[in-house]
Amino acid sequence: MPSSITAQQVSDLVLANRVIRAPYYEKGHDEGVQFTDPDRGLQWGADAIPALLGLFRVEEDPRDDHPDGWVGFARHWREGTLRLDFDLYSGPDESDPVLVVTAMSGREGETTIVDEEFGEVKLPDQVPTEEEWGKHQKRYQAARKDDDTDGSAAVKAFITALPGWKREVATRFDEIIQQEVPDVRRAVKWHQPFYGAEEQGWFASFSAFSKHVKLAFVAESYLDPRPPSGTGPDRQALDLEETDLLDEEQVASWVRQAAENPGMGW
């Protein structure tokens, strides 16, 4: 972990498409100090991303249970203030860090806000316009569209953010895919990791829920034998709870079959 990070460095990571939403991302988690719009609540794409591109203050998270965390503040065009909590994940070589946003919440105040960890925070005089806010979002969407880099670090960051046994299941699934498809392409799409076969498309993904991890296979036809869950060839899945054992040989077979016949294009 770096000893410090600036608002500009956060912005650079976002525009390099190095930002993901954590598996258990929280929205509006500090009750009593949120600002809300009666017609539109806080949204990931419309609010978190433009805020990350306009932070006016970044601080190391002082909480004991957030040893690798950071906190940033940004003015919102609706004249409130957003607090964003995030971690920085770096691979073994400490290169290409990924910004993992864990929470976003609102604060009320015109000249200052009061934050539970940082006390009174002075606000900048300038409030972005709605047009400026929209430009930030468009810059990020352009960066995503033009980016063709490998997404392995983002997937690893997502897995690292999972708790306990769920992280173990996801790690093993990732390892099996790597073994069976050495040139696998990884990416975090729609807030979950996806795996693809080059020049063919996506063939697998996984997601974590409160009591289970879903290993999904995206194929043009049914796998043999069919995984126990899912509604069609492109939605075949295996749901694993904490006490379940992972049949690695069967999962490896499903991975091979799906990778030969991916069911989702780039």
Image: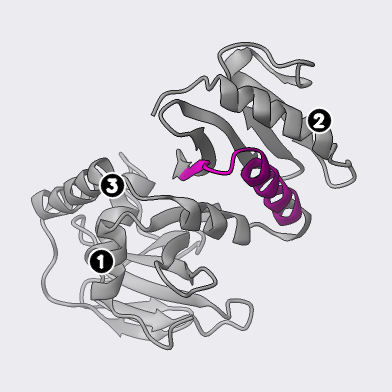
- Judging by the rendered image, the residue that carries numbered circle 1 is 12
Residue plotted at (62% across, 24% down)? 258
Vertical arrangement, residue 250 with respect to residue 223, above or below: below
Q: Secondary structure at mark 1?
A: helix
- State the quadrant of the C terminus: top left
- Residues 176 and 22: in front is 176
In magenta, the rendered stretch is 167-187
> Is residue 115 toward the left or the right of residue 164 in the image?
left
User: N-terminal of the two: label 1 or label 2?
Assistant: 1
- Judging by the rendered image, the residue that carries numbered circle 3 is 147
Vertical arrangement, residue 46 with respect to residue 167, above or below: above
User: N-terminal of the two: label 3 or label 2?
Assistant: 3
Give the residue type at disc 2. Answer: Gln
Calculate the distance from the C-alpha at mark 1 to the C-alpha at mark 2: 42 Å
Give the quarter of the image for residue 245. top right
Vertical arrangement, residue 14 with respect to residue 139, above or below: below
Q: Residue furthest bottom?
A: 3
Tell me which secondary structure the magenta stretch mostly adopts: helix
Residue 147 among those drawn in magenta: no
Q: Residues within 10 Å of mark 1 (few under 14, many from 20)?
A: some
Task: Please give the label number shown on residue 250.
Answer: 2
